[in-house]
Amino acid sequence: MTGVADAYKALADPTRRAILDELTERDGQTLFELVTRLVTVHGLSSSRQAISQHLDVLEAAGLVHRRREGRYTFHHLDTAPLAEIARRWPSPPGGSPDPPE
């Protein structure tokens, strides 16, 4: 259950969701690239240190993996924890439930 709880905790923060959006758009970004994209595309003004801490939470939840290559660290999206959530609560037969009235 810890993995699912970690994923929910990681997804609860809008900055972390923006980081995942960025990695969906272009996987394998460095911290500098992510900070730049978060400022220019999303209008977020977080420091490199703050984004690094968000990446630590995402990594602990298994949603991001780091790959070191020389002086650079590249961040990669891993959707496996999200697939676990989808397996736990599958859609009802016939598709999504009717919206509440």
Image (cartoon, grey):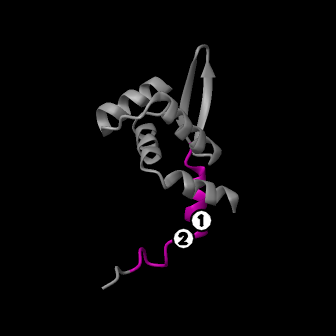
Q: Residue at x 64, y 44 (%)?
A: 60
75 shown above or below 80:
above
Residue 34 on the magenta span? no
Residue 51 spot, x, y in % from top left: 49, 35
Front residue of this view, candidates 26 and 40: 40
Asked whether residue 82 is in view, the answer is: no
Name the residue rendered at 41%, 74% in the picture.
Answer: 96
Q: Find residue 14 and report its horizontal and vertical position in percent.
A: 42, 49
Q: Which is nearer the eye, 47 or 83?
A: 47
Visible in this render: residue 99? yes
Q: Which residues are magenta?
A: 78-97
- Residue annotated with mark 2: 90
Q: Which residue lies at the image location 44% right of the left edge and 78% below the top edge? A: 94
Q: CA distance from mark 2 to mark 1?
A: 6 Å
Marks 2/1 in contact by CB < 8 Å: the verdict is yes
Q: Quadrant of residue 3?
A: bottom right
Q: Position of residue 99 (x, y in %)?
A: 34, 79
Q: Report helix, strand or loop for mark 2.
A: loop
Q: Residue furthest top?
A: 70
Residue at image mark 1: 87
Residue type pointed to by label 1 = Arg
Q: Quadrant of the C terminus?
A: bottom left
Left or right: where 66 falls relative to 23: right
Q: Is residue 70 above or below residue 99?
A: above
Report x, y in % for residue 42: 32, 39
Q: Amino acid at mark 2?
A: Pro
Question: Of residues 45 and 41, which is closer to you in this image?
Answer: 45
Q: Is residue 100 above or below residue 7?
A: below
**Residue 86 located within the stretch drawn in magenta:** yes
Q: Quadrant of residue 97?
A: bottom left
Mark number for residue 2? none
Residue count near mark 2 (Cα–Cα under 10 Å), binned few <14, some 14–19, many ≥20: few
